[in-house]
Image (cartoon, helix red, strand yellow):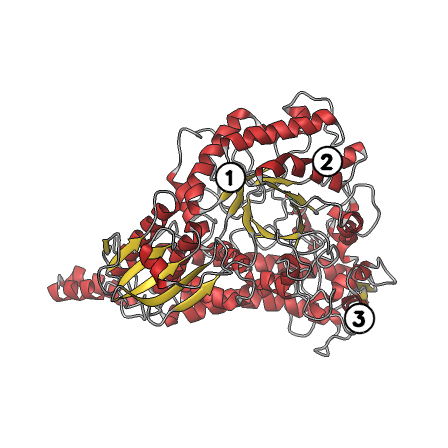
Amino acid sequence: MLTLTRHAGDLSCVRAMRTLASGLCAALLLFTATAVQAEDGYALWLRYAAPDAGAAGPSATRVTQLVVAGSPGVPSATREELQRGLAGLQGGAPANGDAVTRAGALLVGTPAASPQIARLGLDLDGLGGEGYRIRSAVVDGHATTVVAANEDIGALYGAFHLLRLLQTGQPLDGLDIREAPRLAVRMLNHWDNLDRYVERGYAGQSIWDWHRLPGWLDPRYTDYARANASIGINGTVLNNVNANADVLTPMYLDKVAAIAGVMRPYGIKVYLSARFSAPMEIGGLDTADPADADVQRWWRTKADEVYALIPDFGGFLVKANSEGQPGPQDYGRSHADGANMLADAVAPHGGIVMWRAFVYSDEEPVDRAKQAYNEFVPLDGTFHDNVLVQVKNGPIDFQPREPFHPLFGGMPKTPLMMEFQITKEYLGFSTHLAYKAPLYEEVLDADTHVQGPGSTVARVIDGSLDGHALTGIAGVANIGSDRNWSGSHFDQANWYAFGRLAWNSDLSSRDIAVEWTRMTFSNDPAVVEPVVGMMMASREAVVDYTGALGLHHVMGRGHHYGPGPWVEGGPRADWTSVYFHRADGNGIGFDRTRRGSDAVSQYAAPVAEVFDDVTRTPEEFLLWFHHVPWSHPMRSGRPLWDELVLRYDRGVETVRGMRETWAGLDGRIDAGRHAQVAAFLAIQQDEAQWWRDASIAYFQSISGRPLPAGVAPPPHPLEHYKALEFPHAPGDTQ
Ligand code: GCW
């Protein structure tokens, strides 16, 4: 469906038509109607839109014939996707064939399924099952684009790569591409409850419609699988890590099996979060002690039952002895005892266990940033072969900026899996535009120095540093039942970028933003450049207006919505803001140096030395590692207090600029998506201002310092901000 864009010219024309009933004007109006489609975001980056009028559109190359070798299952999914994509991009699907018979063909498959591919003798060594080659070749005398892989799933990934080339306007000649993923397990973690409530979800209900499953398979499941396969995601944990044991009952396992059936042709394995006490809750046992023979037998039998229904079931994700969840420590056993017991149950079936390291004890008085390391490092080397320890990117909890988690590099004998958060619990929920790829990139590129320079976090998790074959990465999903999947159009980019970096951690966040923008909005440089500019500035803006220079955990209590630097008291100190920022009349910041909590010593010596030294610590981590006076001189020459205040202002200013840039794109982007983004940016600007005002009001009440010259005072007294309440803010724990 075509809609008219609301150019000023169109409106004046409408006015003129009313008064003059001018036929000429009507013709002009039709003529100037641009091909901006009415869109709601459901298609994600798989819009396969025909070339934009007047812009450098998708590739001019036309595929004349489509040959996808192979039988049902993955090859059918590949064929359907290519047909759909080419039909959209070329304005009509090419002829299907069993073999290449004309120039301009696209040949996709494995040497085993296609004699024509086999005859080309392409070198597919080292690509594994998921890798692929894309080659311009001559097949039986016809110029052909070939997508070849060792296994069908590689061919599907190659097909998506080819579609990406076409969508982003790249020609199909002279191609010689070789791709294989760096990590074995690339997955989403849904924090979705069985009643469809999504913990830290801001995009509606869970997409898993448990009540209607297995009878009703929402077509959305297939589109979910397509979207994930397009970025190389090959696993999904369906339920919340704060798990309900019911998901392991026969009734729910039937539903899980139905979802697995939809995922299978797209190379996506289904996993479940397992509640450690399930043997008691649904198994009738009176203990969940991992050393107990009945408990071990229960899990083995349960694994057998799961695999009988879902032969390619991926395995279990476990949050144990963390934030009130049951676990092996309830019985005096270790995390390794618990993980290994479950690992043994799934091992005969080829399953894995992902055991989370997000732990901090109720009783420990130690700096929370240190606790996971303290608990897990002594267990290094004791986990069974099919266990991955899943570690959040930073030592606290998905803050807008954190230093990398010291466990990366601290457990060389254990494969560590990265856990990023795609949903924006601490970065403005779904209404703030914050492109998270620069955050992911910063962490992956961080150098642990454990084996000298170049020992990056990326090399820890891809196994190359310590020689692990079992490797993985997880992203806490931002997907829900909202029509646009992620709650906001721009949050789709975080899902997209997570998948792309999971496939290849060397990709740059900017290149990913360009790719995504071209596929999601337009190839028009007048759109791509400003949109990418907004995206690339956005995460730093959030850091600035929520608390820069290493401040962390300063948000509202419980729901985590909005500012709350004054939060204190309550059940535990390390759930308060004052615990983390430690502001007093003299200064601010958490002293994690050797003279303080000594968290710095959990890093390798060269890193520890930098973080321990206030003059060498990067300013973005200053208050993470140091308690410094308000007058501390910053590199800008300003005292810390002034710098902090100016950062708050800078954050608000960046959002104002983003809003202006977006307003300038009116008419170049379909009206529906443009309007929603514009409205969300207005919300973001108001809320950035609120964060800034409330934070300055609070910290000024502690520092007692005047605002730098020209800086506007907060419009309300501190008490106003403290009194605001948000009882039904979304996503809070239930
Ligand atoms: O980020 C915090 C969240 C909790 C979450 C927990 C975790 C699933 O506030 O909602 O629980 O981390 O990662 O386990």
Q: Which mark is residue 678?
A: none
Residue sitting nearer the eye, 7 or 381: 381
Amino acid type assigned to the residue bearing label 1 in the image: Asp
User: What residue is disc 3 on?
Assistant: 614
> Which quarter of the frame holds ligand 1?
top right
Task: From the top left corner, tell me how far across and down residue 268 is, in percent.
Answer: 48, 45
Residue sitting nearer the eye, 419 or 458: 458
| Residue 109 visible to the viewer | yes
Residue sitting nearer the eye, 263 or 528: 263
Left or right for 118, reference 456: left
Which residue is at 32% across, 55% downward? 115
Amino acid type assigned to the residue bearing label 2 in the image: Gly
Q: Which mark is residue 312?
A: 1
| Label 2 Cα crowd, 10 Å radius (few <14 / some 14-19 / many 20+) | many
Q: Which mark is residue 327?
A: 2
Instruction: Tell me the CA gap for discs 3 and 2.
Output: 39 Å
